[in-house]
Image: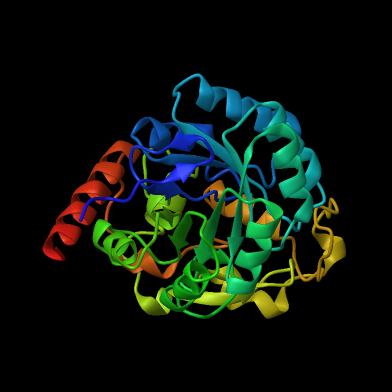
Amino acid sequence: MDLPKLRIGERLARYPFVQGGMAVRVSTGRLAAAVAEAGGVGTIAGTGMSCEELRSEIRYARSRTDGIIGVNVLFAIRDFAALMRTAIEERVDFIVSGAGFSRDMFRWGKESNISTISIVSSGRLAEVATRLGASAIVAEGGEAGGHLGTFRTLKEVFREVRGATDLPVIAAGGIVTGEDAAEFFALGADGVQLGTRFVASFECAADDAFKRAHLNLKEEDIVIIESPVGMPGRAIRNRFTDGLQGVESWERLNCSGCLKHCSRQYCILEALALAQKGDVENGVLFTGTGATRISRIMSATDIIAELVEGATKSLSYQT
């Protein structure tokens, strides 16, 4: 069995590996470009950026590759529409969103002839996204890092989503190796998305302390936290997560009103930004369950090559 062919709109990826968009400033133009140039699909995370910063990151990526580049923006932030419009103006190959469902995104994609990808955790939402004009669907299971739409396993979610749409389906959540990917290719996935694996890459924009924190983790080092977005999230346990119930009030956190709706327990963008800059004890380090199987930092090119080799070998054993 060969690797599947992943098509995003009119573009065909050389390899069916999608780099997830991780905020704040973890997945920037440098990482997305490196993944795309290596034959995968690169994603810039626009959440937490200004429109001009996002524009700059897209142009940086475009200057370094003609591979597939897209932008992910968290639906829950107030600047969602403005950031998506910026990505569209810059003619990215696709726009993608999760942690909420945007019907407007599909209309913008149709008007601009840019592919739209929806991250879902149920067959029902996959059906809605298909009807609204999505180009592909990311089926995300409960093993993922960051904001979670479900605690159901990826295998359960994937099978439900695969049965609900004829669009390309990309499996996401807890996947870090080619062998992991092969399991879902055998089940009918057109591609897989990896976020956490690319944190431990040289091109990731996060501080080295942030990257090292993702290495050689044990299961007990990863916890579920509540996010002010109104959703649970999976993160690395640290001083902040241990003391989360005692976080100081909203008024002490220099609120910028970044979210459409917020619990006001703490500022998620501030916490993510702290971690990205290297404060790994007082910030939030989102991570997936697969982090327990990551032991070294590598180049994006080598990660893609390792994924291709591992998936190809695993699939050959199944034929």
Q: Is residue 86 left or right of residue 16?
A: right
Who's the residue at 42% across and 37% down the image? 12
Residue at the (51%, 80%) spot, across then down: 152
Comparing 255 with 133, the one in front is 133
Q: Which of the 4 image quarters holds residue 184?
A: bottom left
The answer to which image quadrant residue 75 occupies is bottom right
126 left or right of 262 in image: left
Q: Is residue 226 visible?
A: yes
List x then y, in percent, for residue 317.
Answer: 12, 63
In front of the other: 112 or 267: 112
- The residue shown at (14%, 58%) is 316
Identify whether 307 is placed above or below 88.
below
User: Does 98 sit above or below residue 206?
Assistant: below
Is residue 204 visible in the rendered image? The answer is no
> What is the count of numbered marks?
0
Q: Position of residue 122 (x, y in %)?
A: 59, 73
Residue nearest the observer in this picture, 129 or 259: 129
State the quadrant of the N terminus.
Answer: bottom left
20 sits left or right of 290 in the view: right
Model colouring: rainbow
Residue 263: image x %, image y %?
81, 71
Q: Quadrant of the C terminus?
A: bottom left
- Compared with 219, 199 (above or below) is above
Image location (x, y in percent) of residue 180: 30, 64
Side (left or right) of 231 relative to 181: right
